[in-house]
Amino acid sequence: QMNEDDTSRMLSFLSEIDYRRTTEPLRADLILINTCTIRDKAEQKVYSTLGRLKAIKRDRPGLVIGVSGCVAQQKGDSLLKRIPHLDMVVGTHNIHRLPLLLKEASSGRRVAATELSDTIDGEEYRRSKEAGVKTFVNIMRGCNNYCSYCIVPYVRGREVSRAAREIITDVRGLAAGGTKEVTLVGQNVNSYGGEDEISFPELLRRVAGVDGIERVRFVTSHPKDISEELIALFGEEPKLARSVHLPVQSGSDRVLERMRRGYTARDYLGKVLLLKKLYPGISITTDIIVGFPGETDEEFQATMEILGEVEFDGVFSFKYSPRPGTMAATFEDHVDEKIKVRRLDILQSTQKEISARKNAEMVGRLKAVLVEGVSKGSAEELTGRTECNRVVNFPADADIIGEMARVLITDAYANSLRGVSQERSLLCS
């Protein structure tokens, strides 16, 4: 979500200097690769992509090639030395400088901007008037947690919150442009605010109060910081989607301690089970890392036990990948790669069964679906999401895009649902 929001902001700044998006690299005047460095595989894809662009740059010397995001922030101008055909490196705090940097790169000067700031420039999150049916809205940046495996604090800096008035102004502008759903984005949204700012739950209330906004989501929430006030808000604010992403990472207390997560498995379960008890049907998704240094078979089994007890609606699961500069990268008891692969396969296979069963339970229910656009699978169908964030495809006329529709769920698949549109109404079950 952080990268998607960054991409949206980059497109906004570029549109102001008459650039528009294209899916044809051979026709592009600018190719900008927005990157992630959470895992080594993602970083290696960056170098692979840059390698493929070398021939295009050779044939079209005027083409500007840039790298932005976390890899850009981490590697800085060393990327320019490593990749001779790269023109521009844009760090995580410098997206708003993109037009100026592009002007310099277009004149033949290779540039790198990776300065980190402990304040937020008012220009950083300014957007164009273009808005989609749903939009991410960044409310803060950075992280203060320094989990032992995570590189985010090093490439996105310390936590800094945007002023609430600026966020509300953004949301009002988006709503005026047709946005119906906003997702408030931050590395740990529970930490939003400070002495001079409102709490995160209060910010959610104010965003939900903006005319035209029909649904509000947020990501990501840290388990150690999710508050009773926020949990209670799911029952108090009807526009707040009953859907929460709460990364557990591991079911082993020893592993969680080495990860520096700040909670135990029992702490986590207590909060998740409270959410499920108070709000039956709430969608809970999570992140899980398998093969963290020193993880034993018994500790992996503890993670599987949490998977079975909670029955998550979705899991983003990954093999542990050491990131340079993090504490965990210095640990000596790394798990064998074959063991990581086997554990990940077991976890993902189990979750696939859980997700299929939970999707099947939706069949026969009437759900409120925010219609986002034409389905990727069929030009004759529309697609949208339920309150619990499940994708639904159904046949209907395109003139209801952007509206809330009543859809009877008829079929369930591994990653989506299919349904039949009922009469248009905002009063959906």
Image: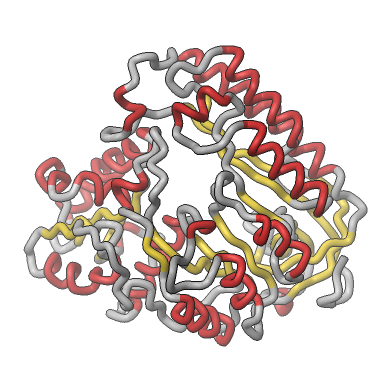
Picture coordinates of residue 275, whole percent (x, y): 75, 49
Q: Nearer the viewer, residue 367 or 115?
A: 115
Q: Quadrant of residue 328?
A: top left
Q: Nearer the viewer, residue 295 or 416?
A: 295
Q: Quadrant of residue 194?
A: bottom left
**Residue, x 39% and y 51% (percent of image)?**
143
Q: Nearer the viewer, residue 341 or 377?
A: 341
Picture coordinates of residue 316, whole percent (x, y): 57, 39
Q: Nearer the viewer, residue 6 or 249?
A: 249
Relative to residue 135, is residue 18 depicted above or below?
below
Relative to residue 304, is residue 324 depicted above or below?
below
Of all residues, the one furthest to the right in this rendering is 364
Relative to 116, 202 lies left or right: right
Picture coordinates of residue 65, whole percent (x, y): 22, 57
**Residue, x 32% and y 36% (percent of image)?**
44
Picture coordinates of residue 30, whole percent (x, y): 26, 63
